[in-house]
Amino acid sequence: MDNNWKTATKADRAALYHVARVVADSTDMSVEAIMEQAFGHKLMVGTDYLSNFRSGAIGRPKAKLIHAWIAKNHLETAHAVDPKLFPKLHTNAWDDYLTNHAIHGKLRIARFDKSMGLVQRKRDQPKPDEILKLGEEFCFHLDSDIAGYAVAFQMYEGTMHPMPLGLNGEFLTTINRGKQFLPIDETGEPEKLVERSDIGQHRFIVAVTEDQSKLPTVTQPPLTIRDVRVHHLGVQISI
């Protein structure tokens, strides 16, 4: 959360106390113990930290430390209590969505051979994670059960990036029902993609829906599960 604690009101700090109280109750900790964890030292004897915190009179720098500790260690609980004070990062929201609702096995990697011809996967059941070499040319092969509109994203090191699927670098494209390559060029041929710099685990997402207005964004997964098909593929980029 990018809350500006330098200007936080007493109401903001009192709301933070309410979240801390719920976190404490759910973990068998005390609010004072949470404060000590956040500050990194024992509370000073004789100072009524708890009363000040409860009333929203706690110092802003201390409120910032408490907020950061709760966000790091108990985000799910804090978000449920006060989503405005503890919003989920978009990658957290997408992680939750992919874990619970993503379709696996319908989005695959297709490679290009040295003669520039396309080489499709021969195995019917792809591995959960595929491996590509840094600089290796590839595209996607999607088997969609609906026709409609699609957008794609790439998640790397906790950051979501939109991926162009359409012509001329556009992000939106149309999808046919059944098997197809993505992206394609103006002649209808598969267009080559390549990762040249970032090794490690990449997550590719293609969302398809019949209603363009329901397409997800980088920061917002689909609001309704029924109307959007979200295909997910993990790919390891190696040297």
Image (tube, rainbow, N blue to C red):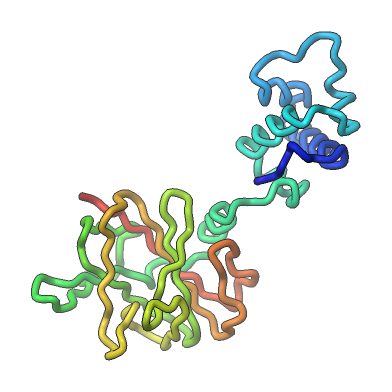
Q: Residue furthest bottom?
A: 187
Name which quarter of the figure residue 43 lies in. Answer: top right
- The residue that appears at 30% across and 67% down in the rendered structure is 125
**Is residue 117 rendered to the left or right of residue 1?**
left
**Is residue 226 rendered to the left or right of residue 121?**
right
Name which quarter of the figure residue 49 lies in. Answer: top right
- The image position of residue 44, as x and y in percent, is 77, 11
Name which quarter of the figure residue 164 lies in. Answer: bottom left
- The residue that appears at 87% across and 29% down in the rendered structure is 57
Q: Nearer the viewer, residue 29 or 170?
A: 170
Q: Residue furthest front?
A: 7
Q: Nearer the viewer, residue 103 or 184?
A: 184
- The residue that appears at 56% across and 71% down in the rendered structure is 216
**Is residue 22 rendered to the left or right of residue 183?**
right
Looking at the image, residue 38 lies above or below residue 198: above
- The image position of residue 72, as x and y in percent, is 61, 37
Looking at the image, residue 238 lies above or below residue 140: above
